[in-house]
Amino acid sequence: MKNRIFQLAGFLSMPISETTMSSSGRLRRVTYEYGLGYMWNTFESKLSTLFTKDTGESTVGVVREERDQVQWVSATEELCTIMKGESSTLLILKRYNSWSRIDVTVECFSTICELARITPFFLHFVVGMGTKFASTDEDFMSCYSTCASENQCIPAEFSGAEDIQDGSLKAICYNIRYFERHGRDLEDPWSCRQSALHHSFTAGSQHSAWVVVQPPEAFNLTIGHTPHPMALHLRYLQAAIANWREYLDSFSQRFKLLNQQIAIPNPYHKLKISFSHEQHLHHLKGKLHRAQHILTNMQATLSIITTHEGSIAQEQSLLPAVHAEFQNQLNNISREIDNYIATTRKLLHISDDLKSMYSDILTFQGQELQRETSLKLEHLAQEDAAGNKDMAVLASLAFKDSRSMRIATVIAMFYLPVNLVFSFFSSTLVWYGTTVEVAQNNGSRIQLRSETWIASVIAILLAIGTVSWSRWWNSMEEKKSAKYAIQQPTRP
């Protein structure tokens, strides 16, 4: 356990190739001793996305207690020069946006870890601040408090460590999610951003080292001269909750507009409500649930800060008035967060009421649409019945026509033999002629030509051919019908 807190700094001061190499690194040993081996693996795999590679973009804001104004530096040597001497220090690390890298190089970050005495728990927040291409790791919030006794402090040969050999080191780190206006032309003007803070306090020298990544816009980049070593936490937390009232009020205004669409009594078919309104309401509820989650985690962070402050106040024997004032201000922040949590719950209840009303309206509209559809189907059924009635009339008329045709066919069949006989006797095959015997007897008789048998044979052959061709045609049609029936798919 000895020397494990500050071995992080020496390890990160190695070049990148050494940083990613072996299990012999100091940070690796420290993180595994703290049970954070998994965090070391994650940090190592994300190095290329966490920090900038361009030294020209690497900038660190430095605030020393004696000057109490921010000074932006780029070179690591310049940072070490400014940090010389015993004094409380605030270091500011910027990001271009919430999805970009931290604007420092790996070498600069390793120097900051050494100078600010950062504990390995801070890596929990650093690994979530790299380059992103999608909304990932958007919910993690936590707070870690550590205390190293005198025999656990970094050896004196490390830079900046001489001031802690006569006392313990207390460190606390946490991340805060907050909302700020992004300034882009979008329907939702708010963005959820993340900031992380690390504070190490040396009991012997009573000096603090602060590191803040992506501080809120409302945060004043100064240390201030206050008798309490944790006073900067109050300003940081107040800056983080500065926009919550306006942010939650924006939901109230949206819900007010949504409620106006259904609050005035009107027939439900006149309400311009669609499923997209429920989708929009679902989206707003999701944001409120996230806001409630953030506020709840902030309350947990305040609880840990309260405990950590009590430990420092007891160890440093702070004046009761100073300790009480800090606790009072922390309680004020806690009560304000409680109020925001209550407001969030109220807005969620309102959203539930709106959703219930939207659902009822859409249900009624669906029932009305179903009723109209039923009426249309009934009308179509009536028209179909009328069409069937007309078809029945046409079928009756067709039946009457077919009966007339049958009668006409029977009459034709009756006269057909007569017609055949008279056609035969009126043909050239038969004629009335006079013979000698007939002339003598003064009479005549029917005479047939000798070729009459040829016509009879041809007629018989034509009749047989016609019957055969009809039977063949009928059999082919039956085969086609049977083949078509086999090819048709069987329906369940």
Image: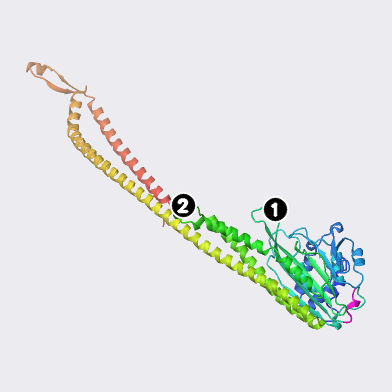
Identify which amino acid the numbered label 1 is placed on: Arg
Question: Mark on residue 270?
Answer: 2
What crowding class fits label 1: few (fewer than 14 Cα within 10 Å), some (14-19), or many (20 or more)?
few
Q: In this view, does 229 lie above or below 448?
A: below
Residue 440, by quadrant, is: top left
Give the extent of the magenta segment.
160-166
Label ID, residue 67: none
161 drawn magenta: yes
Q: Where is residue 218 in the image (x, y as percent from the top left)?
A: 75, 62
Quadrant (top left, top right, bottom left, bottom right) of the C terminus: bottom left
Q: Is residue 120 above or below residue 460?
A: below
Q: Position of residue 98 (x, y in %)?
A: 73, 60
Residue 24 visible (yes or no): no
Q: Which of 197 and 234 is in front in this view?
A: 234
Q: Nearer the viewer, residue 22 or 133?
A: 133
Location of residue 318 by image quarter = bottom right
In front here: 115 or 19?
A: 115
Relative image position of residue 185 (x, y in whole percent)? 68, 51
Label 2: element kind? helix
Q: Does the magenta stretch include residue 277?
A: no
Q: In which quarter of the image is the N terminus?
A: bottom right
Q: Where is residue 339 in the image (x, y as percent from the top left)?
A: 63, 70
- Marks 2 and 1 in Cβ contact (< 8 Å): no
Residue that carries the numbered disc 1 in the rendered image: 184
Q: Indicate the amino acid at tag 2.
A: Lys
Question: Which secondary structure lies at badge 1?
Answer: loop
Q: State whether residue 88 is above or below residue 472.
A: below
Classify residue 285 by image quadrant.
bottom right
